[in-house]
Image (cartoon, grey):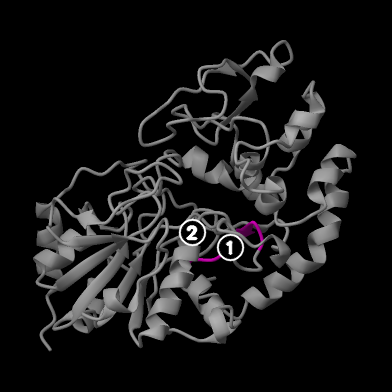
Amino acid sequence: MKVISLLSVVLLLCSCSPKIKAIKTDNPESQIKTGAEQTELYLPMLKGKRVAILANQTSIIGKSHLVDSLQKLGINIVKVFGPEHGFRGNASAGAKIADEKDERTGIPIISLYGKKNKPSAADLADVDLLIYDLQDVGVRFYTNINALARLMEACEANKKTLLILDRPNPNGYLIDGPVLDMKYKSGIGMFPIPMSHGLTVGEFAQMVNGEGWLTNKVKADLKIIKMANYNHDMRYVLPVAPSPNLNTEQSILLYPSVCMFEGVYVNHGRGTYNPFTVLGSPAYKGIYSFSFTPKSIKGMAETPIFMDEVCYGIDLRNYDTELLRKSKKINFSWIKELYKAHPQKEKFFESKFSNQMNNIEIQIGRGDFRQQIIDDVPIETIRAGWEPGLRAYKEMRKKYVLYP
């Protein structure tokens, strides 16, 4: 089988640069080579095959999208599957996405976010091999890992190989939070892992297979293209925003500590250009001086909580995230502080997601957290309650890690 030379790949990638939203270009860990970038390791697997790809705007090689690159390299891509936020990453969180054709390539796009969450047998009938290449952020409630698990089930059911192109976890240093009590299993938490799991997607896939977490304990046929020069303690700045509301390095690093505010009556920056870096509510007027006003922003948050109302609260835009890295702990002090400061405490645990019962329990993954906050239980005492489960997870995780 003829392998395309590295020189030809480099020349191709320099010639095509689709407009994709970058977070930062001066990556301090530029020596890392992602799975996708190591084309010499997987192009031979793709030649002569009918290929489908689960991808979004983060699926890049250099400045080119993976789909665009592989198509120009002669790979037969028969369809693309799109996750939450869509294939090109321009849909709001939770928005239902219709099937369509990609304007750039003409390739059919099948949405896997909404009524349909994994490929059907018909979808895979004309496919020989599937590729998964999505940037994750290492947090249980970020839905890309759930999309991966469902894709693994579909591949196993239809006897297809799944090729995973591994990428860094920007929160890879952080293994913390309660392990999900499966009583609170949901679309934002499907597996018994902590809030911040400390895995790359390749490692997570191995864990799902190894622990028998797929339906009927089946195991998918996996091929993983590992990264080069990566370890979990590295600081990695994502070259492309992984989703519309994780649009800065600051938001990504604060996400494990701030996303729990999805489950309470506080705006966490949705409806601003600073999501996951500001916290507030109109109720805090006169208590906090910092303020912001959520607006409807297409592609980010069309109907944010407290839309067009002035919110007062906490500004984390310049918070030193090295404090999180040094402590290796999720910050639970902000939710305690804002509960204690709220003048109508009975409303604090109301959520905009009124159709989901016990939303804070779904976010945290335990049934006792709400009452612990109400009772002003010290954070270290709260942690002690779920430390045994976290310790057991860390021990189990050792079987599946691919990197130091």
Residue 381 locus on image (x, y percent): 88, 51
**Residue 248 located left or right of residue 119:** right
Residue 198: give its label: 1
User: Tag count in the figure?
Assistant: 2
**Residue 283 located left or right of residue 12:** right
Dots 2 and 1: beta carbons under 8 Å?
Answer: yes
The image quarter in which residue 282 lies: top right
Residue at 14% x, 73% y: name it: 75
Residue 162 locus on image (x, y percent): 36, 79
The image quarter in which residue 384 lies: bottom right
Residue at 9% x, 53% y: name it: 15
Please state which of residues 283 and 330 is positioned toward the viewer in this rendering.
283
The residues tagged by marks 2 and 1 sit, at their Cα atoms, a distance apart of 7 Å
- Tell me if residue 137 comes above or below residue 274 in the rendering: below
Residue 40 locus on image (x, y percent): 22, 76
Please state which of residues 29 and 66 is positioned toward the viewer in this rendering.
66
Judging by the rendered image, the residue that carries numbered circle 2 is 169
